Image (tube, coloured by chain):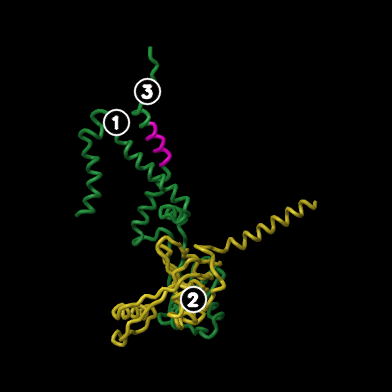
Amino acid sequence: MSNKSSINWFKLNRNLHRDIGYFCVGLVIIFAVSGIAVNHKDDWNPNYKVSHQQISVSDETWQLDNDELLIEQIISHADVSEPVKASYWVSPQEFKVFLKNGNNLSLKLNKDIISYEAIEPRHVFQAFNRLHLNETNESWVIFSDIFAGLLLFLAISGLFMIKGKNSPWGSRSVLVIGGMLLPAAYVFL
Amino acid sequence: MFLKSKTFIAFSLALLSFSQHAFSLQFGNQVDSDKLIKISTVMASPDDYLASPITVEGTITGVCEKRGCWMTLASDKRFENLRIKVEDGDMVFPMTAKGSKAIVTGKLDKIQLSLGRTKALLAHKAQQAGESFDANSVTEAMAIYQLVPSGVEIIE
């Protein structure tokens, strides 16, 4: 009578695929969402919501020789209550006032307008993008390397989870090959 | 009672220390204040400062919106500024830092433009300033200078 213990590789593979898959859910969501955001960064700023408002100021005598008075004039016209952080002459025709909350006002003398720029950070997307683009620290690079290894495992183990007519080795191999050919087509065509 | 006072003082000092650092953002290495030089001095003869690292300070007047990969510092001279440029992702400068003071240590980089690019750049600057521009008036190619930082400190 033999009591030979053998490993059920099929079951082990399925269990590992399941548990590692659960572990990767959060990371996949972060990388997928920030991937879409970064792909479209030319159309949409994923890190900040920046809006501009223009105020017409045609009949005004500006205190161009006194920056403090000029700031007061601009603040009064724009009707903002936020404290001032700094000011700067961009050119003889443009004066900027930076506010403590990160927003700023530009007086454009040649256009007779004050432009109010409001900057609102998108905190969740910023955090996702920082992780995706490895902008945090070196330990995250190591962790994301491990995550990449886990994704490789999920991809390969996925090929050995189903037996029979729905396995990827029969007619459904078309799907596997299609998934490989599609990126190849973008490279070579 | 004495112990409580000591705890209070220690807590206050810790809080003070935190509040001092909470408003300062550090990127890369520590800045080297011993190498501090005015931006106007650098821009007056930039070729003299290409060889070794320098430190400059100024108000942040612009930041790259998409990647935070550059910012401009106001010079101590009116209408002048210096661009601080990093490779994408090396340092990410926050847009909300506009108007804050920054101290930057790094190496000055010279980019020699062709005549065509010089005309295009000056035309763009004139357009932004709302001034007229005659491309035929430009007959010589120019160089632009930017600082590639090894360390940046932004003070709110």
Q: Is residue B21 magenta?
A: no
The overriding secondary structure of the stretch rendered in magenta is: helix
Q: Position of residue A26 (x, y in %)?
A: 43, 44
Q: Position of residue B152 (x, y in %)?
A: 51, 66
Q: Which mark is residue B49?
A: none
Label 1 and label 2 in one chain: no
Measure the C-alpha gap from mark 1 to mark 2: 64 Å
In this rendered view, identify the residue nearer to me: A97 or A156: A156
Image: magenta residue range:
A15-24
Instruction: Identify the residue at the far top of this view.
Output: A1
Q: What amino acid type should be assigned to the residue bearing mark 2?
A: Ala
Chain letter, green in picture:
A
Q: Which mark is residue B74?
A: 2
Q: Residue at label 1?
A: A162
Measure the C-alpha gap from mark 3 to mark 1: 20 Å
Chain of the residue displaying label 1: A
In the rendered view, tell whether residue A124 sits above or below residue B40: above
In this rendered view, identify the residue nearer to me: A47 or A57: A47
Chain of the residue displaying label 3: A
In the rendered view, tell whether residue A158 sits above or below residue A39: above
In this rendering, which labeled residue sits more in front, label 2 or label 3?
3
Label 3 and label 1 in one chain: yes
Q: Residue at label 3?
A: A6
Circle 2: is it few (<14), some (14-19), or many (20+) Cα within 10 Å?
A: many
